[in-house]
Image (cartoon, rainbow, N blue to C red):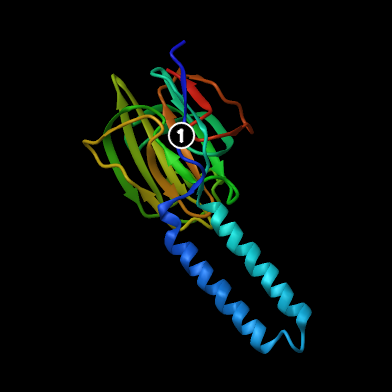
Amino acid sequence: MDLTFAVQPNNMTIHKEGYKSIAIATLVFALLNILSFFFISAALPWLSWLILVATFGLLLFILSFFRIPNRNMTFGDNKVICPADGKVVVIEEIHDTEYFNGPRLQVSIFMSPANVHVNRNPVTGDVVYSKYHKGKYLVAWHPKSSTENERHSVVLKRGNTEILVKQIAGALAKRIVNYLQPGMKVKQNDELGFIKFGSRVDVLLPVGTAVDVKLDQMVQGGVTVLATL
């Protein structure tokens, strides 16, 4: 079996997409607690402590959201690796009208706000399609979110096989970041993009592809084998 593993050389880091959000959250944390100390703590110390604990918890959540943990990455020439963390919510054959204009096997991963939100290339290949679509902000598990929500689709070509990866915004996710452009050559598990605050990623595979995950299974981006080509 052509399957290898590699450990990321760095410890857990903060993703670059989080720098601005973390800076704002830190500023708000400091400002609220300074005001609380001067105007509330003497009369209502319990309220001042409550504000401190609540704002510190929110700051920790923001830091956690943009984390990139150290992981044992999985690589394989004939393997499609999960592009995102989360739970598998769809495995079904669909008719794609965006790129293939034909039947494809769709596997969808729902990403909660608690998941790692960096998205990764499921295969090594050439970027042959990259397009952003404006849209709605239906909840990410809604059946129509794949075609009606704000989204960004890319197609990676490996040999004669083309795989579409679709980043989909949800009710909370209002910003999709995608780093790929047509003509680029990308490596398996390198960063594809990032979605802020909960979302969904669809992978469209050739019909008949052997899927290695099950419905409701929790998966890890860059680690879990999604399918075998």
In the image shown, does 46 or 214 lie closer to the viewer? 46
Above or below, 42 against 86 in this view is: below
Q: Residue furthest top?
A: 1
The residue located at (61%, 84%) in the rendering is 35
The residue located at (54%, 51%) in the rendering is 198
Location of mark 1 (residue): 8
Residue 205, how many percent across, how many down? 42, 26
Q: Quadrant of the C terminus?
A: top left
The residue located at (41%, 55%) in the rendering is 17
In the image shown, does 211 or 142 lie closer to the viewer? 211
Residue 4, how many percent across, how many down? 46, 19
Residue 145, how many percent across, how many down? 49, 47
Q: State the SS at label 1.
A: loop
The part of the image, by quadrant, that contains residue 51 is: bottom right
Q: Residue furthest left?
A: 183
Give amino acid for label 1: Gln
